Amino acid sequence: MAVTPTTATPAKTQDIGALGKAQLASSYDTFLKLLTTQIQNQDPLSPLDSNQFTQQLVQMTGVQQQLYSNDLLKQLVSNTGTGMAQAVSVIGREVTADSAKATLSGGRANWSYNLGRDAASVKIEVLDSNGRTVAVSAPTNLKAGDQAFTWNGSDLTGLKRQDGGEYSLRITPTDASGATITSKVFQRGVVTGVEQSAGQSILSIGGTRVPWTAVTSVRQPA
């Protein structure tokens, strides 16, 4: 009878930085209570030397700032050592990302979408950042599977939108009976760059910024 090996779960290590901040906060509160008590009960004819308390306050503030600096450094190391390194590794590769957003670049915005089954009709809407419909299209390829859609930047009035704007795609596929067909919009393309924004790794795909966490697959480009 085969025995499944068990793996011991390592004990959770204590965060030294968090412990240091907790101890400092406790000491700081105690120091302020002692200071207040001493000031209230000091001899008016022989007041306490305020310079000593000022120096101690400065020292404790310095330690507090150092602890917070350590937290920032830890976050930076985490970003550059794990998520950022993983994101950089996909530069030059083709990725699929769960995102309906695209940036208009070079007068074009590109999306991919998937139809769960053959459709009788598909309505495609390009939405601006406020959710307003700026363009509508009806593709002729109604077969099930992955499809691609490119918007030329012209809105409903015929005006060409400026590059740099972010837009999203909404599709409404229906069958012959008018029932809605399952569909999904996503981004697919070669990663050309990676950046850090608010502690998050952002990929650049054809001018569109996509969070690293939205990536669902990675492969070598054909």
Image (spheres, rainbow, N blue to C red):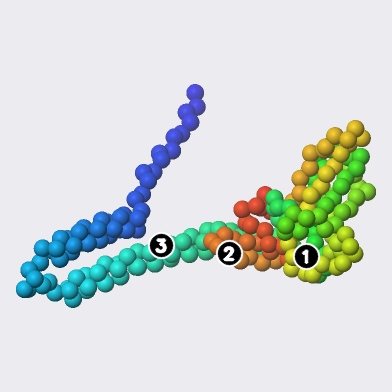
* Disc assigned to residue 197: 2
Report the Cα–Cα distance between label 1 and label 3.
38 Å
Q: Position of residue 50 (x, y in %)?
A: 17, 74
- Taking the view exactly as shown, the residue that stands out farthest to the top is 1
Sequence-wise first label, 1 or 2 = 1
Do tag 1 and tag 2 residues touch (Cβ < 8 Å)?
Answer: no
Report the Cα–Cα distance between label 1 and label 2.
20 Å
Looking at the rendered image, the disc whose residue lies closer to the viewer, 1 or 3, is 1
The kind of secondary structure element at disc 3 is helix
Amino acid bearing label 1: Leu
User: On the rendered structure, is 9 left or right of 81?
Assistant: left
Amino acid bearing label 2: Ser
Question: Disc 3 marks which residue?
Answer: 71
Report the Cα–Cα distance between label 3 and label 2.
18 Å
User: On the rendered structure, is 57 left or right of 174?
Assistant: left
Residue at 67% across / 49% down in the picture? 216
Sequence-wise first label, 3 or 2 = 3
Image quarter in which the C terminus is found: bottom right
Q: Position of residue 133 (x, y in %)?
A: 81, 55
Residue at 79% across / 49% down in the picture? 170
**Taking 17 as reference, is 177 above or below it?**
above
Amino acid bearing label 3: Asp
Corner quadrant of residue 175: top right
Q: Which residue occupies the foreground of this view, 195 or 217?
A: 195
Question: Disc 1 marks which residue?
Answer: 104
User: Is residue 150 visible from the viewing direction of this image?
Assistant: no
Q: Which residue occupies the foreground of this view, 140 or 80?
A: 140
